[in-house]
Image: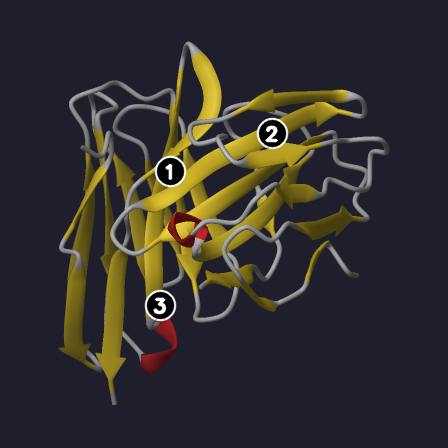
Amino acid sequence: NAGVTQTPKFQVLKTGQSMTLQCAQDMNHEYMSWYRQDPGMGLRLIHYSVGAGITDQGEVPNGYNVSRSTTEDFPLRLLSAAPSQTSVYFCASSIDRAEDTEAFFGQGTRLTVV
Amino acid sequence: TQLLEQSPQFLSIQEGENLTVYCNSSSVFSSLQWYRQEPGEGPVLLVTVVTGGEVKKLKRLTFQFGDARKDSSLHITAAQPGDTGLYLCAGTMDSNYQLIWGAGTKLIIKP
């Protein structure tokens, strides 16, 4: 039972480089989201998707793009990495957006931008 | 300013002790969830509370949602080293189903 799979687990980028963080889920969940986690700030929503072909911005979308071509995959693209994007990134999925729905998380990607 | 304030930020106690951590807001939430996160892993859901005054128990963990649905607490009885982790609360509001997260309480239980 894979659940939510994120790759890579660790990444170091130079300022200005671009990269894609991969996220895949095998639970047929409609709702997927990307968060960043920084010390003392909790999880902040970057982008989310309520289904294939539909994406929307969260609280901190600047510098990131997403797409949702299939139900399973929800990649996060960093367009031009900046040191402020150093963080731990989590992908999550849930069956829907109801108030009592459980969010399932991947193991995270620890990104350092130098 | 966090919409959900968790306290304490850090707690280190001996095995066998009891503890309570809090999740407070000035806003009303339609539901509140508690997650536990271990190092190098994503958060894992412990419980969801949706009714004001609701109490849920999960073995030695007791969760309570405030009557006014603005706050919640997590009480652990006879803490064990396996309880060590970051405890996060997250809530949804009636107008928006996006999860709003607290910054977490880092709990260490020493053997």
Q: Do the residues labelled 2 and 1 touch (CB within 8 Å)?
A: no
Determine whether, in the image, residue A111 is placed left or right of residue B70.
right
Q: What element carries label 3?
A: strand
Q: How many marks?
A: 3
Q: How far apart are marks 1 and 3 (CA)?
A: 16 Å
Q: Which amino acid does label 2 sit on?
A: Tyr
Q: In this view, does B13 lie above or below B69?
A: below
The subunit carrying tag 3 is B
Q: Which amino acid does label 3 sit on?
A: Gly
Q: Mark 2 points at which residue?
A: A48
Numbered label attached to residue B85:
3
Which image quarter holds the N terminus of chain A?
bottom right
The residue most toward the bottom is B111
Colour logic: secondary structure
Residue at 32% across, 81% down:
B81
Q: Establish whether labels 2 and 1 are both on one chain.
A: no
**Residue A92 falls in image quadrant:** top right
Task: Tell me where residue B64 appears, x and y as whole percent.
Answer: 27, 40
Q: Establish whether labels 2 and 3 are both on one chain.
A: no
Foreground label between 2 and 3: 2
Circle 1: is it few (<14), some (14-19), or many (20+) Cα within 10 Å?
many
Residue at 25% across, 23% down:
B69
Circle 2: is it few (<14), some (14-19), or many (20+) Cα within 10 Å?
many
Determine whether, in the image, residue A5 is placed left or right of residue B45.
right
Q: Name the residue under label 1.
A: B90
